[in-house]
Image (cartoon, rainbow, N blue to C red):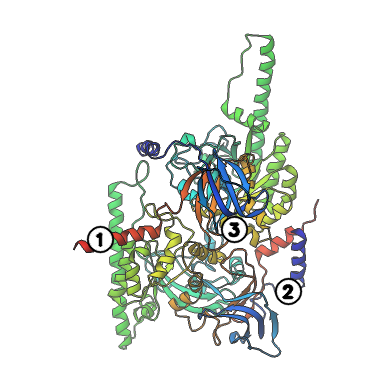
Amino acid sequence: MRTVRASGALLALLIAAPAAAQDVAIRNATVLTIANGTLENATVLVRDGKIAAVGTDVSIPAGVQVIDGTGRYVMPGIIDAHSHMAIEGGINEGSESVTPEVMVPVRDDDQTIYRALAGGVTSALLLHGSANTIGGQGAVIKMRWGQPADSLYFDGAHRIVKFALGENVTRASSSAPDSLRRFPKSRMGVEQTLRWWFAQAQEYDREWEDYRQRARRDRNALPPRRDLRLEALADIMRGDIKVHAHSYRGDEILMLMRVAEDFGFRINTFQHVLEGYKVAEEMAKHGAMASTFAENWGYKVEAQDAIPHNMAIMTDRGVVVSVNSDSGERVRRLYQEAAIGMKYGGMSEVEALSMITLNPARQLGVDHLVGTVEVGKQADLAIFSAHPFAPETHVEMTLVDGKVLFDRSQAMTLRKLIESQRAITTTTEDDR
Amino acid sequence: MRAAMLTLAVLAAATPRLSAQASPGQEGTFLIRGATIWTGTGQTLQNANVVVRDGLIEAVGPDATAPGAVEIDARGKFVYPGLIDSYTPLGLSEIGGISTMNLRSELGEFNPHMRAVVAINVDSDMMAITRANGITSVITAPSGGVISGQAALIGTAGWTWEDMAVERTAAFVINYPREPSFGFGFGGGANPAAQRAARERVETQIRELKTVLTTARAYDRQRTAGAEEVDLMYEALRPLMQGRVPALVSADTEQQIRAVVELGREYGIRVIINGGDEAWKVRELLAQNDVPVVLGSIQSNPPADAPYDAIFAQPGVLHEAGVKFAFSTGGSANARHVPYHAALAVGYGLPKDAALRALTIWPAEMFGAADRIGTIEPGKLANLFIATGDPLDIRSQVTEVFIKGRRVPMDDRHTRLYQKYNGRPAGN
């Protein structure tokens, strides 16, 4: 596996040109800006990987590559706020229930990256699994397919840690004999696990603060022993690391917000949050955002009350909602998932589109860089053959930092494969 | 948005049929007026009516009328034959994570006598949620072993499973033996001995399947000739051996599909491919042999070596090659969204009209029920729905559903929770 990975990265270096930004203009398209409505017959001009102009009266400078957008729809590149793609091997550090010091290892050779691009996706939050009350730190990446792993990280994004509540955490060691089972095994235990560890972290933080005070007076003062776990927890309490919490039931969502408030921090985003609609008021007040499934429900007990109207109710109550994939399959058609928001609970088109663009950008801390088609933002764009919510739609092109990294006209498709096989068969028959 | 929702909720609350929450629907004679009707027979009627009486479609057309009928104004709306999910455990399986709610498979490898129809939970939450989006019939199937049992074609509303059944035995579910995938490389994979053992097990299962079919053929002949001794398992297989009921045989790779077509030829049984990831590779063979395909969920990744759009684009390719197919979700929770599986195929080249047929009349034909369901024609069961637009478009709303002529209540677990929490007063 190691060898495969190394050669994959090497191959990528050989094939792909360095990530030089390009100048490109998409002309005569319908542009779903998210920020400023829908523009017909508009041009999006990209220079140096950033959006330089958007509008109906944009002149295209000479030498700029032109993409014909006639009949097509341009929208911000889709952002997936919950993914397990491009992560090496196991995604749970399951030895203990609190491990915020570990980080997901990003790999560049997972073809899910390419398939995501082919579905208009340009960024994703890669997260650990949900076995731990406090898991590890995730990574925000851009779909820079063909670049080595180090180049995938999205500069400027939040540092993010994954928490988890409910069934997955409490059953994490359920196959072990009782004597070897891991605490916690109930939702009650999850709360106390959180409180115990954050109390430790507070204590740790105080010891360091004391040391810093003493060190000012006493050059020979000894620092406390460094503890990477408590340090990460202290960073969480300071808000330097943002919390994304895997959650299902209303009670546990409420519990976590109250624990965080007691320790002086906020939950940035609840993940899954299938019963968020039951505590949407409280979430809005706390300032928590939500990243949910559009339609998934009923696969376990804590998903029994999941309803597709969740997105609409939370949005209505002032929660910033995104819809995520959590899947290497769903990531290819997040535009369908967003459309479900319009079907159940009557979200507007822009509210629904925001759930896969601006809102996840806010949750990942990159809304100043991407998430809308606006001048000055990075040119992460998806070009659809029809409205992204229409049944006859597909992705024609996806740009990351102004570079066309997916182009259906150049990609190997089923029909092209069949054509090429026909050509081979015909040639063979001619030869006879 | 909130105000609009409240208005809707108030309107819904004022509708009398909501009072009959658990009922499979209001009985009566109905006149649906002024709709655009996609009949499924090659016609789209403008400004036309449908008369529903005694569970059946009585008349369709611009002049169809029924004095005294309950009138439903469908001007500006669209009427379609009820949609079909052609492979799901709906009614057999509820919450995936709880084993007692998933009694879909029996012990043993050969269970052709197990009947899904007798184990349908008519009050399944998932059933009500499914029909609310216009899915009026499903093929509900047992699983496990080599011959899992008999899949049933059922309506998605009814008082009992007898009331719901359209075809009690719609197909025999066969899992064509396949090697488990071992994965490969570092950490994954199995040792050569384990792989060899798995391969041998598959070969044994294929031999056993053929022995069962050979015995079933002999048994059927003897019974036809007057033999009286009855064996439950072989008795169950007689409709298959006589070609009256098809076998729905899972096969995804080219090799498996070829083997299944051959199995059909060898034993004179009608086969339907279930899954068919690589059906496009053998489309001529399928077309020539008139073997249809129940496509596995379009919401699936293609095999690693296939083009990225292989699963999305395959229905269009099969259609052009003359292969009949139907769509399926394979699940219970989101059987309601089977039209959006079809929509993905439309996005990658399948004509819309073919997509709708693959959700209606084609599966009705495959499972021997085209005389009763699948189109809007006089004399057929009144399984149909009214929508605000194209049912392949996620943004369309289904406003009315009729199953066996009953006007189905449109509330379910989801709408009830929605109404409760959408109505939570601010600050409470």
Residue A418 image position (x, y, % from top left): 35, 61
Residue B89: percent from the left, percent from the top? 50, 66
Please give left or right for residue A322 compared with residue A11 in the image. right
Say yes or no: labels 3 and 2 on the same chain: no
Toward which corner of the image does residue A432 lie, by quadrant?
bottom left
Could you tell me how far apart the alpha carbons at marks 1 and 2 are, in whole angstroms?
69 Å
Say what amino acid the circle numbered 3 marks: Glu
Q: Nearer the viewer, mark 1 or mark 2?
A: 1
* Residue B76 visible (yes or no): yes
| SS at badge 3 | loop
* Quarter where residue B261 is shown: bottom left
Taking the spot 67% from the left edge, 53% from the top edge, the residue there is: A37
Q: CA distance from mark 3 to mark 2?
A: 27 Å
Q: Which residue is mark 2?
A: B19
What residue does disc 1 label?
A427
Mark 3 surroundings within 10 Å by alpha-carbon count, few (fewer than 14), some (14 through 19), many (20 or more): many
Asked if disc 3 and disc 2 are in contact, CB closer than 8 Å, the reply is no
